[in-house]
């Protein structure tokens, strides 16, 4: 919805370059929406390491696991 691409296929290997309209502003919105949806916060170093969708999924999974382990 953020990218206004109703039928886009996203895979773990997908990068911003693969999706029309995925620019730096929409990237920031995606991250903010993700933080809100999962009730997590990204630190700057994590954001810098997000090269593909799979990287984002891995960070989310790690953060959610940290919450359940606490």
Image (cartoon, rainbow, N blue to C red):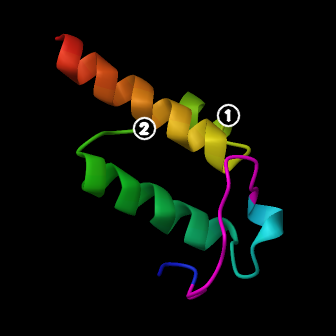
Task: Locate residue 26: give its quadrant.
Answer: bottom right
Compare marks 2 and 1 and give the one earlier in the sequence: 2
Q: How many angstroms separate mark 2 from mark 1 (CA)?
A: 11 Å
Task: Name the residue carrying label 1.
Answer: 49
Q: Which of the two residues, 49 or 59, is positioned nearer the viewer here?
A: 59
Above or below, 17 relative to 38: below
| Residue 44: x %, y % from top left | 53, 35
Magenta part of the protein: which range?
4-15
Task: Name the residue carrying label 2.
Answer: 42
| Residue 60: x %, y % from top left | 42, 36
**Main secondary structure of the magenta stretch:** loop
| Residue 68: x %, y % from top left | 19, 20
- Residue 43 appearing in the image: no
The image's mark for residue 34 is: none
Residue at left offset 38%, top offset 55%: 34
Task: Locate residue 22: give its quadrant.
Answer: bottom right
SS under mark 2: loop
Q: Which of the two residues, 10 or 41, is positioned nearer the viewer here?
A: 10
32 vs 9, left or right, is: left
3 vs 42, left or right, is: right
Q: Which of the two residues, 59 or 12, is positioned nearer the viewer here?
A: 12
Seen as rendered, the residue at the extreme right is 17
41 vs 30, left or right, is: left
Above or below, 23 relative to 34: below
Q: Quadrant of the C terminus?
A: top left
Residue at left offset 47%, top offset 81%: 1
SS under mark 1: loop
């Amino acid at each position: 919805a953020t990218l206004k691409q109703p039928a886009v296929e996203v895979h773990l290997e997908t990068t911003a370059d693969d999706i029309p309209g995925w620019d730096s502003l929409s990237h920031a919105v995606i991250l903010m929406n993700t933080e809100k949806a999962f009730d997590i916060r990204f630190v700057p170093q994590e954001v810098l390491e997000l090269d593909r969708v799979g990287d984002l999924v891995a960070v989310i999974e790690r953060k959610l696991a940290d919450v359940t382990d606490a």
